Image: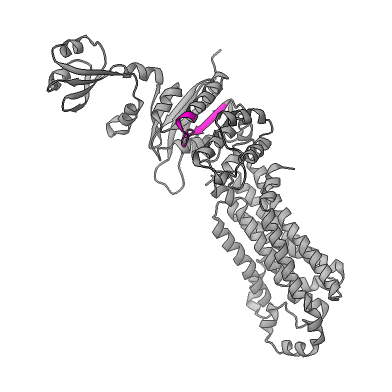
C-alpha cells in the first residue's frame, strides 16, 4: 500500500480582492510523513500566503489542500490537533510571561505536554519567567519554537523558524526538527537561510511570483552540485576552449578564475586542465544559494 | 472556564477596575448635590421651564429636573450612564477581535484546535462580562448614593433602567464588534459605533420636537431607550426585545463574516 502524503496541495490559488494577479497560483505539492520540505523564495513570492492558506487564516480562491487526509478549510479544527505552527512574524502578548503564554496555548490545545515544553525550553535556554514584551527577538522566537513543538505534532508548519536565533540555538532547533522527523512528522519550512535548508531538508521547492518553479530533492542537488568547479589559472583562462567541451557551462569568469558546471564525463575537462598551469581547484559539494539565484534570475524561470 | 474568556478578562482587569472607579465617581459627584438642588428646586425649575423645547429634549425631554425621578433621569440615566457604558462597550467591541488581529496574536490562538466561532463567542462573552462588572458597580453606586441623599425612586426601577442602559450599551458594542468581525479597522469601528451612539442620542432626543427626525430616529438604538418612563415604573419589554434583536442580528452577521473571511 502506498504511503499517503501528510500535506497534499492541489492547484491551490489565492488572489486577494483588488489585485491584478494571484499571490499564489495553481500550487501543487506533497509532503510525505517523515519528510522535511524546504519552501524557498524571496519576500513577497507567496511563501507566507501558502502557509496562511494551509492554516486556514486565508481562504483559497481555487484549488484544495489536505493535511492528514482532512480538508484545510472544512476540517481546520481537527487538523490543528496535530499541527505545530510558527508564524513568520511571530507576535506575542507583551504583558504575558513565557510560562503564561505556553500554559495558555497548552490549555487551548488540551493535550499538550507541559513537561516536554519545559524540556524544549531548557534545551533552547529560553527565558520563560520574564514578560514577553521585555524579551529580545531571539528569545521570543524560542518561545515560538516551544509552542510549535510542545505537543509533539505530526505536522509542523514553520515560517522562517530560526530567524533571530544564534548559531548554537539554531543547532538545537535542527535537533528538534530531526527528532520530529524521526517520529514521522511531516515538516514544511519556509526559509531564507540556504545553509539551513541544505542541512535539514529532504526536498526543496522554489516559489516565484506565486508559482512553484522547481522542486528538487537535496540529494539530487548535491549530485549535480558535485560537478561544479571553481578553477584558478596561473594565467589567462582558456575560456573559449573550455566552452567547446560538451556538457560544460562557464557560469562565472573573472580575471584568472572561472566557475564551471559540468554535466557528463569529466575526462575531457581534466585533460584540458592538465595542459594549463592551475593555481587551485575547488569542488563544490552543494550550493543551494546558487540554485536559488539561478531560479530567480529571469533566465531561470521554467 | 474557557481559557480565552479567562485571559481576556484577566488582561483587562486593571482597566476595568479604573472604569468602575471612574463611573462610580461620576455617579457619586452627580448625585451627591441633590439635597442642594432640592432646596432650590422651585427657582431652578422656573429657569429650566424657560428653555426652548429643543434644548429640553437634550436633557431628557422633560422639564421635570428636580423631582427624584427627574433628577436621576437628567443627571444619570438619560445621557451620562448610556454615554459611559456606551464608550466602554464600543471600545471593547472594536478591540476584542481587532487587537488580536492587528497584533497577529490571533494566529497563535487559531493555530490551536479552536474554531473561529468559539473564538468569536469567547471574545464576545469576555466583553459582556467586563461590561457587566462596570454596570453592576454603577448600579450599586446609584442605589447606595440615592439612599444616602434621599432620592426616593424605587430600587426596582433603578435596576430596570440600569438593565435597559446595559442592553443599549451592548447594542453599541455589538455594532462595533460586527464592524471589526467583518474586517474593518479598530478606528473605523470605534468611529461608526460612536456616531451610532451620539448621533442616535441627538436625533432621538430632537425627534420629539423636529418632526422630520422622527422617521430616522427609529434606526438608532437610542430611540428604544426610555429612561424616564422606566424610572416611573413603565418598563417596556418591546424596547428591550428590539435592542436584543439588534444585538442578535449583529452577532449573527459577525459570525457569518468572521468564520470565512481572510485574517489581516
Query: In the image, is residue A16 above or below residue B12?
Result: above
In which quadrant of the rendered view does residue B239 lie? Answer: bottom right
In which quadrant of the rendered view does residue A293 lie? Answer: top left
- Taking the magenta stretch, the answer to whether it contains residue A163 is yes
In which quadrant of the rendered view does residue B212 lie? Answer: bottom right
Residue nearest the observer in this picture, A269 or A234: A234
Query: In the image, is residue A274 above or below residue B95?
Result: above
Q: At 14% from the left edge and 20% from the top edge, which residue is drawn?
A: A234
Q: Which residues are magenta?
A: A155-168
Residue B238 is at least partly visible in this image: no
Residue B50 is at least partly visible in this image: yes
State the image coordinates of residue B207 (x, y, percent, origin top left).
67, 76
Q: At 74% from the left edge and 74% from the top edge, which residue is drawn?
A: B29
Picture quarter with the N terminus of chain B: top right
State the image coordinates of residue B151 (x, y, percent, origin top left).
84, 76
Q: At 73% from the left edge and 88% from the top edge, which residue is drawn?
A: B49
Amino acid at each position: 500500500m502506498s504511503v499517503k502524503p501528510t500535506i497534499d496541495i492541489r492547484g491551490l490559488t489565492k488572489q486577494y480582492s483588488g489585485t491584478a494577479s494571484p499571490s499564489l497560483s495553481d500550487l501543487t505539492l506533497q509532503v510525505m510523513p517523515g519528510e522535511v520540505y524546504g519552501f524557498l523564495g524571496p519576500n513577497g513570492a507567496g511563501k507566507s500566503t501558502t502557509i496562511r492558506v494551509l492554516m486556514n487564516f486565508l481562504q483559497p480562491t481555487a484549488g484544495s489542500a489536505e493535511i492528514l487526509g482532512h480538508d484545510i478549510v472544512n476540517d481546520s479544527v481537527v487538523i490543528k490537533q496535530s499541527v505545530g505552527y510558527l508564524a513568520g512574524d511571530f507576535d506575542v502578548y507583551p504583558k504575558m510571561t513565557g510560562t503564561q503564554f505556553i500554559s495558555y496555548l497548552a490549555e487551548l490545545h488540551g493535550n499538550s505536554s507541559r513537561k516536554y515544553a519545559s524540556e524544549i525550553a531548557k534545551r533552547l535556554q529560553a527565558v520563560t519567567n520574564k514578560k514577553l514584551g521585555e524579551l529580545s527577538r531571539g528569545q521570543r522566537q524560542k518561545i515560538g519554537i516551544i509552542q510549535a513543538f510542545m505537543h509533539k505534532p505530526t505536522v509542523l508548519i514553520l515560517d522562517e523558524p530560526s530567524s533571530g536565533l544564534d548559531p548554537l540555538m539554531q543547532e538545537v532547533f535542527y535537533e528538534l526538527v530531526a527528532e520530529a522527523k524521526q517520529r514521522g512528522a511531516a515538516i514544511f519550512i519556509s526559509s531564507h537561510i540556504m545553509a539551513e535548508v541544505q542541512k535539514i531538508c529532504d526536498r526543496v521547492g522554489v516559489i516565484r511570483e506565486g508559482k512553484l518553479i522547481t522542486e528538487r530533492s537535496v540529494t539530487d542537488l548535491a549530485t549535480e552540485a558535485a560537478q561544479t568547479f571553481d578553477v584558478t589559472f596561473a594565467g589567462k583562462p582558456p575560456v573559449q576552449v573550455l566552452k567547446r567541451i560538451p556538457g560544460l557551462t562557464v557560469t562565472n569568469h573573472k580575471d584568472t578564475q572561472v566557475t564551471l558546471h559540468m554535466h557528463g564525463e569529466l575526462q575531457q575537462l581534466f585533460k584540458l586542465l592538465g595542459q594549463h598551469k592551475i593555481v587551485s581547484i575547488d569542488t563544490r559539494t552543494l550550493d543551494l544559494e546558487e540554485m536559488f539565484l539561478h531560479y530567480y534570475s529571469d533566465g531561470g524561470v521554467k | 472556564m474557557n481559557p480565552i474568556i479567562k485571559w481576556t478578562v484577566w488582561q483587562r482587569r486593571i482597566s476595568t477596575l479604573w472604569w468602575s472607579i471612574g463611573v462610580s465617581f461620576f455617579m457619586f459627584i452627580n448625585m451627591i448635590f441633590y439635597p442642594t438642588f432640592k432646596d432650590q428646586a422651585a427657582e431652578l425649575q422656573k429657569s429650566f421651564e424657560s428653555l426652548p423645547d429643543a434644548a429640553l429634549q437634550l436633557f431628557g425631554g422633560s422639564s421635570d429636573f428636580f423631582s427624584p425621578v427627574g433628577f436621576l433621569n437628567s443627571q444619570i440615566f438619560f445621557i451620562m450612564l448610556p454615554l459611559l457604558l456606551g464608550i466602554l462597550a464600543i471600545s471593547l467591541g472594536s478591540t476584542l477581535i481587532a487587537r488580536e488581529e492587528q497584533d497577529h496574536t490571533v494566529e497563535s490562538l487559531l493555530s490551536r484546535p479552536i474554531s473561529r466561532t468559539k473564538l468569536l463567542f469567547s471574545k464576545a462573552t469576555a466583553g459582556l462580562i467586563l461590561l457587566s462588572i462596570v454596570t453592576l458597580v454603577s448600579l450599586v453606586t446609584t442605589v447606595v448614593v440615592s439612599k444616602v441623599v434621599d432620592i426616593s425612586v424605587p430600587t426596582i426601577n433603578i435596576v430596570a433602567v440600569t438593565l435597559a442602559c446595559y442592553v443599549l450599551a451592548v447594542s453599541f458594542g455589538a455594532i462595533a464588534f460586527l464592524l471589526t468581525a467583518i474586517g474593518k479597522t479598530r478606528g473605523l469601528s470605534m468611529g461608526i459605533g460612536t456616531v451610532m451612539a451620539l448621533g442616535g442620542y441627538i436625533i432621538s432626543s430632537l425627534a420629539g420636537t423636529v418632526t422630520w427626525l422622527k422617521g430616522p430616529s427609529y434606526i438608532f438604538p437610542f430611540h428604544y431607550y426610555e429612561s424616564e418612563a422606566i424610572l416611573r415604573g413603565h418598563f417596556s419589554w418591546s424596547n428591550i426585545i428590539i435592542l436584543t434583536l439588534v444585538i442578535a442580528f449583529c452577532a449573527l452577521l459577525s459570525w457569518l463574516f468572521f468564520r470565512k473571511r481572510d485574517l489581516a
